[in-house]
Image (cartoon, rainbow, N blue to C red):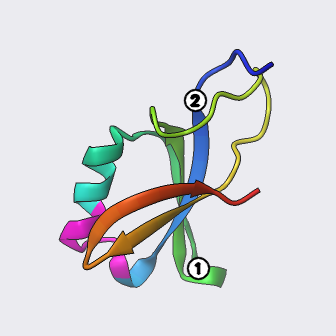
Amino acid sequence: MATGKRLGRFYVPMSEIERDHISQALRIMCFVPFRVECLFHIAAFEMIGTSALFGAVEEGALAPEYKLVFKDNTLIEVNKTC
């Protein structure tokens, strides 16, 4: 049973990082970043942190990946991908 922090990671395309819907999504998620890294080889920012919308993980576990789903520039889902 997972008793650790609610931890997750997701990717934001470099072309989208300064758009309003991304900052709104981060606010809605109450996302607190632990690490943000620009990955030039995939033209995206990897964001690792905590949110109440993420599942709890065991201490020391890798952050599972989530996908942010938007409709009309509004966050509608946060889905675990692996």
Considering only order in the chain, which callout, 1 or 2, is on the residue closer to the N terminus?
Answer: 2
Does dot 2 land on a helix, a strand or a loop? Answer: loop
Q: Amino acid at mark 2?
A: Arg
Q: Which residue is mark 1?
A: 40
Task: Tell me if mark 1 has few (under 14), some (14-19) or many (20+) residues whose alpha carbon lies within 10 angstroms of its own.
Answer: few
2 vs 32, nearest the viewer: 2
- 66 up-or-down from 49: above or below: below
| Viewport quadrant of the C terminus | bottom right
Q: Which residues are magenta?
A: 16-22
Task: Tell me if mark 2 has few (under 14), some (14-19) or many (20+) residues whose alpha carbon lies within 10 angstroms of its own.
Answer: some
Q: Amino acid at mark 1?
A: Phe
Please report the residue visible at 49 percent of the width from the left and 55 percent of the height from the top. 78
Q: Measured from the top left, where is residue 16 in percent x and y?
A: 35, 78
How many numbered marks appear? 2
- 44 up-or-down from 6: above or below: below
34 vs 73, nearest the viewer: 73
- 54 up-or-down from 71: above or below: above
The alpha-carbon separation of the residues under discs 2 and 1 comes to 27 Å
Q: Measured from the top left, where is residue 24 in percent x and y?
A: 22, 57
Furthest-left residue in view? 20
Q: Which residue is mark 2?
A: 6
Does dot 1 land on a helix, a strand or a loop? Answer: helix
- The picture quadrant where one finds residue 5 is top right
Q: Measured from the top left, where is residue 55 in percent x and y?
A: 62, 35
Please report the residue visible at 45 percent of the width from the left and 32 percent of the height from the top. 52
| Viewport quadrant of the N terminus | top right
Q: Measured from the top left, where is residue 62 in percent x and y?
A: 77, 40
Frontmost of labels 2 and 1 is 2
Residue 69 in magenta? no
Please report the residue visible at 70 percent of the width from the left and 15 percent of the height from the top. 3
